[in-house]
Image: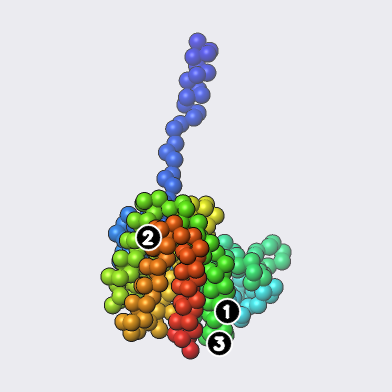
């Protein structure tokens, strides 16, 4: 009887809980929900936070103030009452906003010390909100934007040609289908630069995925919003149909080299895509 009661107690104390579902990677979820145009309508937010209401106002304005240099790295933020007065926010809203900014790597909060701005190299730079604040309005933002774009180009030149070369030996039929679909989406969107930028990002994401390197795949999802910002700017310089056709042709060369298993050719073609994109980006930023 005692053993039976023990078994009953163990059963009662260990209820079955439902496991939360694991979210799909951004590119796969976007593809399943409707493709390139759907991504254009519903951009992903890797930060995972909804920025709205009073709390959203505090996050946005304080984030911009930090990124623009109003509050410099190492500097303590004003005391809570002062911030509450400046942003017309309650203490709970302010504290929740500060937690979000801490999660983005911008600040650190310590008891009896205060809230301090972290060094710039510790910020979550690829966070979609932090990126947007670098591209905002105000003094110094143009220099911040140009520096970010330069750093992105250098990073892409180091990584993407290698990803394309790896893809030549590892891409599956499904990988090739995804790259080709993104290329076709670019061709179909040649008259709509907003949709074209999303298709361009999808192409590069598909090449990263085709490398079948876990770290490169994670990196691709990390920089997807950064790539979209870059492409949206540089394609402002692609007004003429010929420029668009040239850009599509270069991406097609990357795809053909990957399909043909020509690793060095794929790396060269991807390097050409990045360098020509750099020229367009500089033209658009002038």
Q: Which residue is mark 3?
A: 139
Residue 78 left/right relative to 208: right
Closer-to-camera residue (63/94): 63
In the figure, 144 relative to 23: above or below? below
- Of tags 3 and 2, the one toward the viewer is 2
Residues at marks 3 and 2, CA–CA distance in whole angstroms: 40 Å
Which mark, by number, is residue 147? 1
Q: Which residue lies at the image location 37% right of the left edge and 60% below the top edge?
A: 179
- Of tags 1 and 2, the one toward the viewer is 2
- The answer to whether mark 3 and mark 2 are in CB contact below 8 A is no
In the figure, 170 relative to 9: above or below? below
Sequence-wise, the earlier of marks 1 and 3 is: 3
Q: Position of residue 105 (x, y in %)?
A: 60, 65
Q: Which residue lies at the image location 39% right of the left edge and 58% below the top edge?
A: 259
Closer-to-camera residue (272/10): 272
Q: Residues within 10 Å of mark 3 (few under 14, many from 20)?
A: few
Quarter assignment of residue 188: bottom left
Sequence-wise, the earlier of marks 3 and 2 is: 3
Q: Residues within 10 Å of mark 1 (few under 14, many from 20)?
A: few
Secondary structure at badge 2 equals helix
Give the mark count.
Answer: 3
Secondary structure at badge 3 equals loop
Q: Position of residue 224 (x, y in %)?
A: 46, 65
Q: Which residue is mark 2?
A: 179
Q: Position of residue 78 (x, y in %)?
A: 64, 75
Q: Which residue lies at the image location 35% right of the left edge and 63% below the top edge?
A: 182
Q: Which residue lies at the image location 55% right of the left edge and 64% below the top edge?
A: 159
Residues at marks 1 and 2, CA–CA distance in whole angstroms: 30 Å
Residue 132 seen by the camera:
no
């Amino acid at each position: 009887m005692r053993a039976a009661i023990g078994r009953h107690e163990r059963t009662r104390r260990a209820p079955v809980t439902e496991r939360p579902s694991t979210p799909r990677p951004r590119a796969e979820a976007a593809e399943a929900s409707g493709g390139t145009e759907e991504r254009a309508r519903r951009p992903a937010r890797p930060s995972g936070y909804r920025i709205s209401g009073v709390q959203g106002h505090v996050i946005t304005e304080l984030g911009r103030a930090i990124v623009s240099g109003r509050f410099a790295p190492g500097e303590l933020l004003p005391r809570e009452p002062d911030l509450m007065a400046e942003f017309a926010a309650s203490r709970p809203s302010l504290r929740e906003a500060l937690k979000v900014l801490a999660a983005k790597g911008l600040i650190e909060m310590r008891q009896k010390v205060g809230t301090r701005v972290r060094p710039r190299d510790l910020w979550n730079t690829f966070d979609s909100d932090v990126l947007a604040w670098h591209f905002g309005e105000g003094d110094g933002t143009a220099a911040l934007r140009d520096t970010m774009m330069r750093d992105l180009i250098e990073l892409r030149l180091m990584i993407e040609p290698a990803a394309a070369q790896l893809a030549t030996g590892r891409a599956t039929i499904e990988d090739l289908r995804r790259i080709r679909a993104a290329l076709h989406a670019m061709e179909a969107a040649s008259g709509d630069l907003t949709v074209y930028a999303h298709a361009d990002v999808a192409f590069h994401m598909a090449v990263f995925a085709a490398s079948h390197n876990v770290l490169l795949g994670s990196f691709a999802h990390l920089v997807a919003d950064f790539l979209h910002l870059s492409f949206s700017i540089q394609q402002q310089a692609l007004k003429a149909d010929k420029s668009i056709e040239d850009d599509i042709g270069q991406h097609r060369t990357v795809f053909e080299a990957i399909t043909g298993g020509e690793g060095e050719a794929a790396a060269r073609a991807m390097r050409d895509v990045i360098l020509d994109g750099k020229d367009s980006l500089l033209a658009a930023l002038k």
